[in-house]
Image (spheres, grey):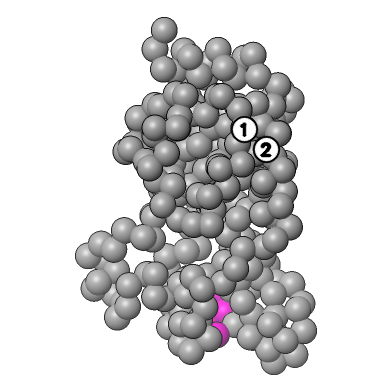
Amino acid sequence: MNEIEILQEMTEKAENIVFFGGAGVSTESGIPDFRSVDGLYNQTYQYPPETILSHQFFMNNTEEFYHFYRNKMLCLAAKPNDAHIKLAELETNGKLKAVITQNIDGLHQLAGSKKVLELHGSVYRNYCMRCHQSYPVQTILESQGVPKCSCGGTIKPDVVLYGEGLNNDVINESVAAITRAEVLIIGGTSLGVYPAAGLIDYYRGKKLVLVNKSSTPMDSRANLIINGSIGEVFKHLHG
């Protein structure tokens, strides 16, 4: 049996699968991984993405933050790929209990997944920092400069910036899901970003699957490693 056939057998027999995904799940839908500093960033922006996407930069250079955010982080035309679609099917069939994602693009929900734990928030939720009124993503997209609430407060995306803590409720739900998981599939992440990557320490089973184009620090702990495109791998799964 090859690796995909082994994964197929695992998913067929399992009744409690949890998926943990990173940027690689979204890049196959055409969403750039902002950590890769390419020529485009260097030509257009004075700062690296990690600096711009920090709490301190947002507070001190809000207009420059939004210039980058609108151009690079709002990829609203992106469509779910084979990985998103297959995960939604596994949930519909009662096998997948949760998707835990580091992505903020809402593609899992667009594909039909219901139980999605967003570690880093979502571009689709935005709120006034003063009165906490909620705003849709269209408000950010259609505004110019710094988007303002009707009360005069600054509107902030509900995404976790560098230097901000993760949502405790989401963390606790993720820990609970991973602790109970029979099969834990980790895909599209190099597992280098903490505290999110530390969540897999809570997995107690013996069916840890890593699907990634490159090796990760957790490879030695995995029961099955598939090096390749996550969309391609999931496209071959059935049932």
- Compared across the picture, whether 52 is left or right of 123 comes to left
Query: In the rendered image, which quarter contains the N terminus?
Result: top left
Q: Which residue is mark 2?
A: 179
Q: CA distance from mark 1 to mark 2?
A: 6 Å
Q: Residue 223 appears at what percent x and percent y?
A: 47, 24
Badge 1 amino acid: Arg
Q: Which residue is pictured at 67% across the width and 46% down the height?
A: 175
Marks 2 and 1: in contact by CB < 8 Å? yes
Q: Which residues are magenta?
A: 142-146
Figure check: 91 above or below 23: above
Specify whether residue 54 is in view.
yes
Q: Which residue is mark 1?
A: 204
**Residue at the spot 48% in from the left edge and 14% down from the top edge:** 6
Q: Which mark is residue 62?
A: none
Which residue is more in the foreground, 33 or 140?
33
What percent of the width, then of the height, locates residue 127? 69, 75
Q: Position of residue 185 (x, y in %)?
A: 54, 32
